[in-house]
Amino acid sequence: QVQLVESGGGLVQSGGSLRLSCAASGRYFSISNMGWYRQAPGQQRELVATITRDGKTNHADSVKGRFTITRDNAKNTVALQMNSLKPEDTAVYYCRQFIMGALDSWGQGTQVTVSS
């Protein structure tokens, strides 16, 4: 059974930074793809960034150059460094662990609020 626990959300002013972290339990972290997604009120959940088991990253155009996803296989964690935050980044951020066709787990989410 996989459990994902996000931390690091909070309230920050526009232009500020936050670092989200996701701790994963279970045996499959090193062979899993990991991702961060977000959902703003009244909107669909959207991809923010993903990182493959080999460390290849993909960032949404809206966060490129501002957000960076990283992983630490020794600690079973994935992080999202968020810089130059904007009010439109306000959302609940979710961690995802997935292996295509075999595993798809989500965390409970952490709130990020950016004030203008």
Image: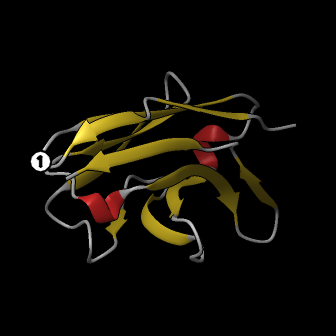
Q: Label 1 neighbourhood size at 10 Å, few (<14), some (14-19), many (20+)?
A: some
Q: Position of residue 5 (x, y in %)?
A: 64, 31
The front one of 33 and 90 is 90
Image mark count: 1
The front one of 1 and 19 is 19
Q: Position of residue 96 (x, y in %)?
A: 62, 53
Farthest residue to the right: give it: 1
The residue that label 1 is drawn on is 15
Q: Is residue 3 left or right of residue 83?
A: right
Residue 90: quadrant of the picture: bottom left
Taking the spot 17% from the left edge, 57% from the top edge, the residue there is 66
Residue 10: quadrant of the picture: top left
Farthest residue to the front: give it: 116
Taking the spot 71% from the left edge, 69% from the top edge, the residue there is 100
Residue 99: quadrant of the picture: bottom right
Farthest residue to the top: give it: 75
Q: Is residue 14 left or right of residue 105?
A: left
Q: Secondary structure at mark 1?
A: loop
Q: Position of residue 12 (x, y in %)?
A: 26, 37
- Say above or below: 93 vs 72: below
What's the image's color scheme? secondary structure
Amino acid type of disc 1? Gly
Q: Position of residue 17 (x, y in %)?
A: 20, 38
The front one of 93 and 74 is 93
| The N terminus - image quarter | top right
Taking the spot 71% from the left edge, 51% from the top edge, the residue there is 106
- Say above or below: 106 vs 48: above
